């Protein structure tokens, strides 16, 4: 059995609100799982059910092969880091780190050894005598992480731990947390609404929306093979472009090009005759030079956004907005009318009604 198993887990709050529907997940020992999704999709609720801070309304939660639905947080041996990294303000960094172990009656020598080791991992050795008010946001966050890892538990839960930090600190802490995870080997569940955090940190990502799991997969899976339009639009920055089109004689016509659906959909192309489908392509999965095995489209340029390493070009395609991500070296000759190519393997097709993927690229 996996290290953590959630089977058809549901949360119905006392006011009747059904916040999480049939959540299923098996996490292996040492895996780094990220729950990602927009505000209110049920990420924190699920994490709190795993922590034992919230009852499971329906379904089963196992740690190894033990059913733990009725176990309290302490028995589950989980450590949790919250968004608000409430440190004890009147205690030094050393005491903040040591406090949990002191409560458990751990020997002073052992506590000292673990505090020193944790401080070393987190780069806090020089700050052990400081009070929290004399630390930067990033340093405080490290103390909060330290307070959890010092307990050497098997399960590490984090709820948006970086959201109070500025952009630069977030990048630093992101790699620090990944490194700590490698060193501790604890099974980690990390909640964020930030798809970049999810993509850079996760072994596997759980994408959620409105209390439902949309997809579980590696960062590559969810980026290259999204199950539906929601995942395709949520993962990736800028998001995937979508164009609604009607299928006629097995083809779709878009911005100066006709795309034969048979090579993409096989015999299923016939099922969509006369119906609407959605074509998706990623801003970065295009070329400005002519390509074979690609469709060539023409869009009118509305705006360009120079970002240094690349340029976002905002265009309209048959009246619909789209974004292209191109190299700054390619934009010097941008006309108001821009031709570009989407290699066939970079085209996604979705059912316009169900929004489910009907063909994905074959990367
Ligand atoms: P965020 O990123 O904003 O923290 P989230 O994905 O973590 O969002 P949750 O906090 O899990 O979302 O909340 C999921 C849904 O459950 C939300 O619609 C929220 O309003 C609702 N909810 C949360 N707590 C309760 C509660 N105690 N009673 C009723 N509804 C609740």
Image: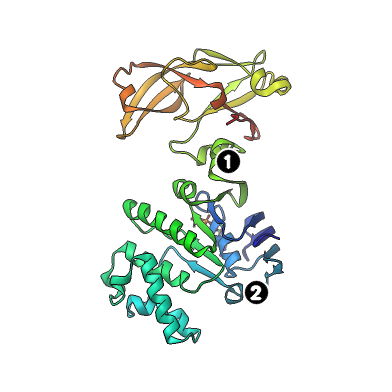
Q: Nearer the viewer, residue 118 or 224?
A: 118
Q: Nearer the viewer, residue 39 or 363?
A: 363
Hey, which quadrant is residue 351 in on the image? top right
Category of crowding for the residue at label 2, using alpha-carbon neighbours closer than 10 angstroms: few (below 14), some (14–19), many (at least 20): few
Q: Is residue 95 above or below residue 357?
A: below
Picture residue at 68% right of the left edge, 64% below the top: 61
Q: Is mark 1 within 8 Å of ligand 1?
A: no
Tell which quarter ligand 1 is in.
bottom right
Label 1 element class: helix
- The percent coordinates of residue 311 (x first, y second) are 34, 30
Q: Is residue 180 above or below residue 96?
A: above
Q: Nearer the viewer, residue 321 or 345?
A: 345
Q: How many marks?
A: 2
- The percent coordinates of residue 34 (x first, y second) are 53, 53
Category of crowding for the residue at label 1, using alpha-carbon neighbours closer than 10 angstroms: few (below 14), some (14–19), many (at least 20): some
Picture residue at 67% right of the left edge, 15% below the top: 250
- The percent coordinates of residue 116 (x first, y second) are 37, 75
- The percent coordinates of residue 58 (x first, y second) are 70, 62
Q: Is residue 78 above or below residue 12?
A: below
Question: Looking at the figure, which quarter contains the N terminus?
Answer: bottom right
Is residue 86 among what the camera can see? Answer: no
Hey, which quadrant is residue 31 in on the image? bottom right
Label 2 element class: loop
Picture residue at 66% right of the left edge, 56% below the top: 26
Is residue 302 among what the camera can see? Answer: yes
Q: Which residue is labeled 1 in the image?
A: 221
Picture residue at 43% right of the left edge, 66% below the top: 145
Q: Which residue is labeled 2 in the image?
A: 71
Q: Earlier in the sequence, mark 1 or mark 2?
A: 2
């Amino acid at each position: 059995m996996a290290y953590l198993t959630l089977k058809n887990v549901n949360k119905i709050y006392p006011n009747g609100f059904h916040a999480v529907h049939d959540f299923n997940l098996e996490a292996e020992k040492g895996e780094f799982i990220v729950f990602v999704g927009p505000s209110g999709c049920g990420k924190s609720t699920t994490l709190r059910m795993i922590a034992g801070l919230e009852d499971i309304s329906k379904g089963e939660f196992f740690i190894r092969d033990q059913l733990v639905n009725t176990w309290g947080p302490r028995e589950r041996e989980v450590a949790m880091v919250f968004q608000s990294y409430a440190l004890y303000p009147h205690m030094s960094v050393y005491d903040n780190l040591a406090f949990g172990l002191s409560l458990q009656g751990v020997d002073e020598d052992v506590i000292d050894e673990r505090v020193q080791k944790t401080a070393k991992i987190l780069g806090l050795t020089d700050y052990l005598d400081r009070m929290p008010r004399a630390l930067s946001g990033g340093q405080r966050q490290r103390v909060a992480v330290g307070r959890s890892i010092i307990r050497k538990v098997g399960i590490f839960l984090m709820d948006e731990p970086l959201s109070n930090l500025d952009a630069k600190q977030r990048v630093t802490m992101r790699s620090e947390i990944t490194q700590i995870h490698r060193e501790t080997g604890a099974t980690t569940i990390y909640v964020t609404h930030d798809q970049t955090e999810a993509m850079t940190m996760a072994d596997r990502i759980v994408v959620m929306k409105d209390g439902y799991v949309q997809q579980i997969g590696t960062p590559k899976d969810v980026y290259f093979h999204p199950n539906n339009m929601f995942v395709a639009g949520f993962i990736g920055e800028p998001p995937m472009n979508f164009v609604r089109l009607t299928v006629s004689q097995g083809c779709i016509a878009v911005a100066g090009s006709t795309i034969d659906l048979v090579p993409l959909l096989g015999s299923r192309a016939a099922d969509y005759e006369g119906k609407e489908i959605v074509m998706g392509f990623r801003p970065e999965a295009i070329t400005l030079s002519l390509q074979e095995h690609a469709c060539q489209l023409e869009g009118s340029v509305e705006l360009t956004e120079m970002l240094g390493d690349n340029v976002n070009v905002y265009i309209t395609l048959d009246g619909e907005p789209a974004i292209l991500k191109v190299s700054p070296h390619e934009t010097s000759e941008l006309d108001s009318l821009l031709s570009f190519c989407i290699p066939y393997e970079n085209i996604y097709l979705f059912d316009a009604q169900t929004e489910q993927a009907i063909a994905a690229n074959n990367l």
